[in-house]
Every structure is written in C-alpha cells, then in structure tokens.
Amino acid sequence: MSEKKPQMMKPATAAQKLGILLEAAPEEFQNSEISRTDLAELAANPPVWLAELRANGPHPRQVVAAKLGVSISGLARSGVTEPLTSAEISLLLQQPPAWLVTERATQAEVRADQIRVKDARAEKAAKQERAARGAAQRAAHRGE
C-alpha cells in the first residue's frame, strides 16, 4: 500500500489559521507549504517566533478587530488599514478615539440583534415542536 500524501496549504492560509501576519513570519515559513500535521504542531507547541508574533504583533486585521471589539468593516470605515502591534492596540483601548467608541457601539448592537434573532428562531422551533407533539398525542388518543 502507498502512504497517503499529506494535505498541504499555502503559507497565507496557515498564517491565517494561526492568527498571524504572514509578512511578519520568518522567511522560511513564508516560502514553504505547510502540512496540516505541521500546522497542528505549530499550534500545539508554538516556536518562539510564533509566540512572539501572537503576543506582540504586528497583528492581521481579523485579530486587530477582535482585540478592539469591532468588525473588520469597522476598521476599514475608520481608515485603519495597516497591521497594529499589541502596544498600539492597547493604547487605542486606553484612550479610545471617537471612531472606536462608535464602532464598538455598532458591534454591540449587531451582536444584540444576532442574539435576538437566534432566540426568536429557537422560540419558533420550540412552538412548532410543541404543536407537533400535541398533534401526535391527539392522534394517538383517538386511536389513529
């Protein structure tokens, strides 16, 4: 039997899965495909360079947005297009500019609306389940 060929991914995909900025990673990482096994090993036992990048940055947009509590679109609307370091993010959080306050409020509204919609769907599903159960019980009671 032949051995299975490991699944490989591009460095950009691996960097995204690790939550790091590809351009800040070592050249060796940037220029080689990564197997899923290697990615799992990096995630489980991060080398110094990976731990350093995760702790201090520069961070990719999705990480910056998450740390600031805003959406990626909110970053774009605010003109934040460059990667930020943890120190820069911390400074923004300590002294939030008007755009950050606005975008965090917007994000909070979006999350509250998502929870409201989810709860409404769950309630509708529960009502349908109760109605179906009741119909089945009535049918059983009539001997159908």
Image (cartoon, helix red, strand yellow):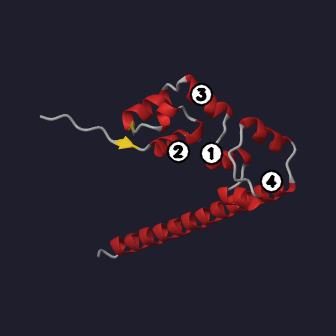
Nearer to me, 115 or 54: 54
Residue that carries the numbered disc 2 in the rendered image: 16
Q: CA distance from mark 2 to mark 3?
A: 15 Å
Q: Which residue is mark 4?
A: 100
Disc number placed over residue 51 in the picture, else none: 3
Q: Earlier in the sequence, mark 1 or mark 2?
A: 2
For numbered disc 3, what is the local secondary structure?
Answer: helix
Q: Where is 98 relative to 15, above or below?
A: below
Q: Position of residue 76 (x, y in %)?
A: 70, 59
Q: Amino acid at mark 2?
A: Gln
Residue drawn at 32 percent across, 41 percent down: 7
Q: Position of residue 33 (x, y in %)?
A: 40, 39
Is disc 3 surrounded by few (<14), some (14 to 19) or many (20+) residues within 10 Å?
Answer: some
- Label whose residue precedes the other's in the sequence (2 or 3): 2
Q: Quadrant of residue 119?
A: bottom right
Residue 20 percent coordinates (x, y)? 58, 39
